[in-house]
Amino acid sequence: MSNGNVNHPKKGSQIAVEPIKAMKDIKAIKKLLSDKPRDLCLFTLGINTNLRAIDLLNIKVGLVASLEPGDEFTLKERKTCKARRITINRAVHETIQGLFKVTAYESGDYLFRSQRGAVLTVPSLSRLVKMWCKMIHLKGNYASHTLRKTWGYHQRVSFNVGIPELMVCFNHSSQRQTLDYLCIQPEEIKNVYLNEL
């Protein structure tokens, strides 16, 4: 039963959220968040890793406080219970350090806290992502999963990472699943038909 809410999927179905496909939109969100260190760090870390929202929100300060670009940390994924190694890049490092400059933390604190000091929740992150996208007038369906999808989409489209590598990163069982997940299957199929012989 959908209760009349178009954002509530029918039992057994799901609502697909989209990646942020245009680099200009990513830059616009970063600019929008430039005076909000927690949100900028959350967005930047989210689009620069393939972490699920629950794992992103469960990062503790001690895991990342002393890392430099190229260093990695390991966390146990909530969904799969597998250890995931995450390498941080320069953008992630800079936003983490920017957050540390304005927020007092203990090593065991969650990196992303609410204004009341509790760890952020996945629904809270979804509301933030929707709000950021709305504020830059981005049309589409966006939520917390958008961050992970954005990472994958740009690994494929902007950096030409192969589908087999992305299958491993996402722990998918087929190339089709990865293409569908990244919302690029229709684009790539259309481009095949546009090739001229």
Image: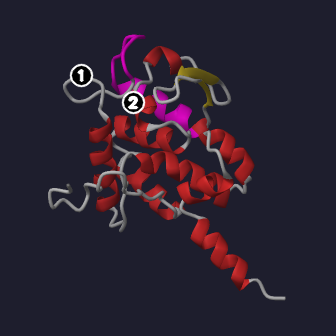
Residue at 33% over, 17% down: 104
Q: Nearer the viewer, residue 162 or 14?
A: 14
Which stretch did the figure color magenta? 91-110
Residue 48 lies in quadrant: top right
Q: Is residue 109 above or below residue 154?
A: above
Q: Which residue is mark 1?
A: 117
Residue 95 among magenta residues: yes
Q: Position of residue 131 (x, y in %)?
A: 28, 53
Is residue 187 visible in the rendered image? The answer is yes
Q: Position of residue 40 (x, y in %)?
A: 40, 41
Q: Is residue 170 left or right of residue 54?
A: right
Q: Nearer the viewer, residue 115 or 83?
A: 83
Q: Is residue 195 above or below residue 156?
A: below
Q: CA distance from mark 2 to mark 1?
A: 13 Å
Residue at the left extreme of this rendering: 3
Q: Mark 2 packing: few (<14 Cα in 10 Å), some, or many (20+)? A: many
Q: Which mark is residue 109?
A: none
Q: Is residue 6 above or below residue 64?
A: below
Residue 35 lies in quadrant: top left
Q: Earlier in the sequence, mark 2 or mark 1?
A: 2
